[in-house]
Image (cartoon, rainbow, N blue to C red):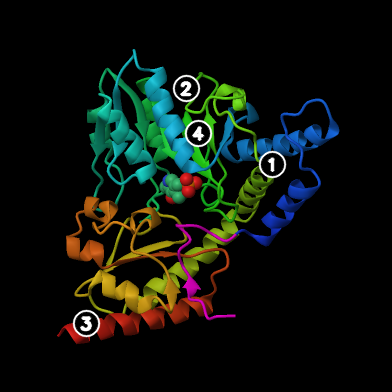
Amino acid sequence: MVHRPIYLDCHATTPVDPRVLEAMLPLFTEQFGNPASLTHAYGWEAEAAVTRSRQTIAEALNASPEEIVFTSGATEANNLAIKGIAEACFSRGRHIITVQTEHSAVLDPCQYLASLGFEITYLPVQPDGLVNLDALDKAFRDDTVLVSVMAANNEIGVLQPLAEIGARCRDRQVFFHSDAAQAIGKIPLDVQGMQLDLVSLTAHKVYGPKGIGALYVRRRPRVPLAAQLHGGGHERGLRSGTLYPPQIVGFAKAVELGLAELEAERDRLIALRQHLWQGLQPLPGLHLNGHATQRLPNNLNVSFERVDGQALLLGLRGTVALSSGAACSTASTAPSHVLKSLGRTDALAYASLRFGLGRFTTAAEIDQVVAGVTTTVQALRQAAE
Ligand SMILES: *Cc1c(COP(=O)(O)O)cnc(C)c1O
């Protein structure tokens, strides 16, 4: 097999866990029925598998199964949540609050709504990446219909204070949405305790397959939502289209495994991340991006002084697979909007590495990455002198 670099890009995607694949396989070839076919056993079998999966995903959020709407992933779930609320609450208000450091799958639907006449407030973050709750308090208006704040940031891993935000939204009767694509199966989520009304999920960041996710939609008190895909009326009319049982079963298995192993995996990943951070310390001019402890266990984001970001990634290409920011924005040449929101200079925002450790990362791999990063940074600095 060709030599491949060590994979530390788990915020972009993760491999499917073999246990997940095993759970999915029978749904392709044997239990292949359409879960909407109500007249025969093929349909019932597929329907039963979907029902069990819906139950598992609901339990993971402390929700009930009727509140889970399957989608193609978190991008679609965010679009359904944000545009769906905007459309359903059109006559009540046209103001939405979100945060500068959100994923483009939240920022872009907001920008689209702005082009239709909605007003969007983009809250700044503190230098540690956390939302300023006082700024949120001041941003609410009489016509605010939605607050959208992600659970865990995909670049710097920072965990936003969802319960505090949820309490503020409930007080003002404003709907609260969270993009939890990076959080599900990694940190505890509780739609009751956090007073969440809408939550976007995806499977492929948590060792499940790509192309499947869900939106949690609160039933009590009911959250009004306008469907964005119309057709056969699947998912209680909120998302038409034939369900995809293999992906749904894989999604549920991935979430189940994530929760079962959450604490052990958290401790293991924090230790590995600490090993990585300690290993890099002999290099001068390092900056940790994002809060030191209120972040995903598997995330480390570091900026390097006096290094060209492009050259750094190029130099590391054979050693380690990672990126300096979101996978979807690496095509653009602008510095990360997340790091800029923390107040980083363009140079430091460019010269950053996002380390996304995962379930299959080992201490030996971290040692190799430390050695590779150290020699690359030193060589680039020497060449620039
Ligand atoms: C990956 C990601 C998305 C997009 O999810 P897809 O399922 O790939 O559409 C949205 N938000 C965040 C925070 C993500 O990390």
Tell me the mark number nearer the camera, choosing from 1 and 3.
1
Left or right relative to 216: residue 136 = left
Is residue 103 shown above or below 96? below
Residue wearing tag 3? 381
**Image coords of residue 233 (percent x, y):** 60, 23
Tell me the mark number nearer the camera, choosing from 4 and 3.
3
Few, some or many residues within 10 Å of mark 3 (<14, 14–19, 20+) = some
Q: Which mark sits nearer the N-terminus, 2 or 4?
A: 4
Q: Amino acid at mark 4?
A: Gly
Q: Which mark sits nearer the N-terminus, 4 or 1?
A: 4
Q: Amino acid at mark 2?
A: Leu
Residue wearing tag 4? 193
Q: Which mark sits nearer the N-terminus, 4 or 3?
A: 4
Is residue 103 shown above or below 45? below
Label 2 near ligand 1 (CB < 8 Å) = no
**Image coords of residue 301 (percent x, y):** 35, 63
Is residue 274 shown above or below 48? below
- Spatial distance from mark 4 to mark 3, Cα to Cα? 49 Å
Is residue 325 shown above or below 226? below
- Spatial distance from mark 4 to mark 1, Cα to Cα? 30 Å
**Image coords of residue 316 (percent x, y):** 37, 77
Q: Which residues are magenta?
A: 1-15
Q: Amino acid at mark 3?
A: Arg
Which disc, if any, is residue 245?
Answer: 1
- Spatial distance from mark 1 to mark 2, Cα to Cα? 24 Å
Q: Amino acid at mark 1?
A: Pro
Tell me the mark number nearer the camera, choosing from 4 and 1.
1
Left or right relative to 230: residue 343 = left
Tell me the mark number nearer the camera, choosing from 2 and 4.
2
Which disc, if any, is residue 361?
Answer: none
